[in-house]
Amino acid sequence: MPPRTSTLPTSRPSRVVVEPVRPVVDGGNYSAKSAIGEPMTVVADVFADGHDVVAAALRWRPVTTGQQSEWQEVAMVSVGNDRYTATITPNELGRIEYDVVGWIDHLETWRRDTVTKLDAGLDVTSELLTGTRLIDAAADCATTSQENRDHLAHLHRTLRDGDTMVLSDARWTDIFWRCTPREPEAHLARPLPVDIDPLHGTFGAWYEFFPRSAVVNGSRSRVGHEPDPQPSTLLESIDRLDHIAAMGFDIVYLPPIHPIGTTNRKGSNNATTAAPDDVGSPWGIGSPEGGHTAVAPDLGTVDDVTTFATACSGRNMHLALDIAFQCSPDHPWVPAHPEWFAKRPDGSIQYAENPPKKYQDIYPLDFESDDWQGLWNALADVFRFWIERGVTVFRVDNPHTKSFAFWEWAIAMLRSEHPETVFLAESFTRPRVMERLAKIGFNQNYTYFTWRQSQTELREYFEDLATRTVDYFRPNAWPNTPDILTEQLQHGGRAVFVSRAILAATLSPSWGVYGPAFELLEATAVREGSEEYLDSEKYQLRTWDLSSDDSLAPLLTRLNQIRHDQRSLRNLHTLHVHACDDPAILCFSKTDPAGVGRPVLVVVNLDPFERHQAFVDIDLHALGLPYGADFDVVDELGGVTYRWSGNMNFVDLAPWSASAHVFSVHRVDEAATDDIGTASTTGTAVAA
């Protein structure tokens, strides 16, 4: 709020008030987020004293250091109750800023009032004289184009000839918006920033795998089913990319690929003592072979990373690397920069802990180091090193345990140099901390989706994500990770894997799986009550058989195809949860803000053991349909079309057949097929 003052203004202030509604983050202290090529809607309240007509415009321009770009402008449209909106589609990466401008539209006010009096049969002689002066003033305005001057001259002549019917033409509203002198204008208190990211920064499907493990029957890998498999290399892992690309994933994410320390190396199943042939955890980074800018010799070389990234790009995917800022006791930084690590009273370095978990194989960095500037520069240079070698997507391990100030500085600097970069925060921590990371620059964040399982939990969580934090916090939903095998996945069987995949892929614009563990239904924990996998790839090599008859690859393929076909699934803003009389069923929809894609309606049985039949109460307005309308829903999973009528419709979902529907919604007059089923939506789905 500007400071109050009793000083008389030197120029007449505008009578108009402009208040931002969205997107705005903490009053403009942080940037909102949008994506290149996607519509961005700006909403503001614009109003004035009295009853004059108020007009508004949205202005925006790129923000480039040391340069002042020209403003672009588009009219804002009133949607009632003093609220105005306008939508633009950014076409360049980087930061933009926007302003909302409001003014009294004297010409439109005059036209409205004159037409009202004409309709009432009143004399308007005086009003026509007033209008003539306003028209002449607008024609003399320096910003009025010749085309609009011609329009105004025509209006002047028509009114002079006594034809007042011309004022009833609504097209004058747009002409007057362009011509009315705007002084004095009202503006936002300051322009508001928005970061324009690559599309995969806001919408994409991630697939994580350990390149040192091997697969059979899905690649030309030299490794088979031998009891003691040998590590696969990065170049050999390129063979796996065709399988991942065929499932429709957009981003291939590799855990850390750096040399692994031997001091306190973890053994199989997180044993504190490693056997001589144990490969260790990739997150125990650093050995005499190098640190964060080196590659584990068993995996290959730095050049192999570039080759791997190029192979991903050739399959229309991006490579994401894990950046974990922690060090094995054998990391070159430990002897070279001991000041970067906190020491205990006896002079030793405390290993990392997250009680009850202990990480004896890594040292945490000390962000309160006296040489914090040297540490910051070294960490930023790690990102630069990999960016220069073709990697522009990063999954950052535990950023909430590092300095907020460091991330704000580093991401701003790196994205000013490389606006194509994308940063995913792996921060399963407190909500305010996760939100802070999003505000200071992370493009995406892991979420609590993994543990939100009931209808109420899912509804409340995603409604919050779709409203309160939607302008800056981008969720990335994962049913599993190498660290998280939920109790639900351990005991729910195939049906839980199916429902969790469908929910993640449709609730969130970005989602991911840790594979092949997910697609092959890996569900055995190291012990009851733990979320750790038995024989976890974090500590040992695995060989996966991708040809398993139980594989969920067909479902994942179909889900990713639906996501790319249905534009409504790209956004979170339009999420709408519909009522259902059964708490085991979640029903929600999304629509395309650009109005191009069809509405999508998703109905999921959350119970992996029982069949559920229920009525869903569809809010037709949320789907853009009139009350009581008949409409067709096409099951994009099962391929069957059903005719629904009005708001109450019946669903029948069994975990052993079709446990969910992902419907595209069609008006009856544009039905996609003549194959109309019954209101009982039973059919065969790919998920079966």
Image: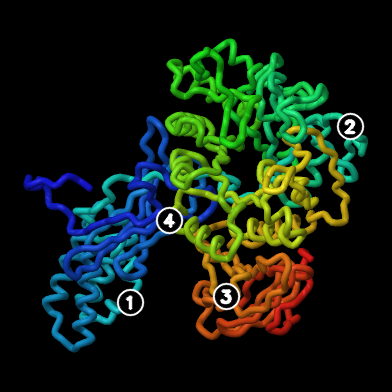
Q: Which residue is mark 3?
A: 580
Q: Residues within 10 Å of mark 1 (few under 14, many from 20)?
A: few
**What is the CA distance from the residue labelled 1 to the residue labelled 4?**
41 Å
Q: Which residue is mark 1?
A: 169
Left or right of 109 on screen, residue 408: right
CB under 8 Å between discs 3 and 2: no
CB under 8 Å between discs 1 and 4: no
Q: Position of residue 16 (x, y in %)?
A: 21, 59
Q: Which residue is mark 2?
A: 228
Q: Which residue is mark 4?
A: 468
**What is the CA distance from the residue labelled 4 to the residue labelled 2?**
51 Å
Whichever of labels 3 and 1 marks the residue nearer the N terminus, that label is 1
Report the amino acid beneath label 1: Asp
Whichever of labels 4 and 2 marks the residue nearer the N terminus, that label is 2
Q: Nearer the viewer, mark 2 or mark 1?
A: 2
CB under 8 Å between discs 4 and 3: no
Whichever of labels 2 and 1 marks the residue nearer the N terminus, that label is 1
Which residue is found at the position 51% from the left and 40% from the top?
A: 442
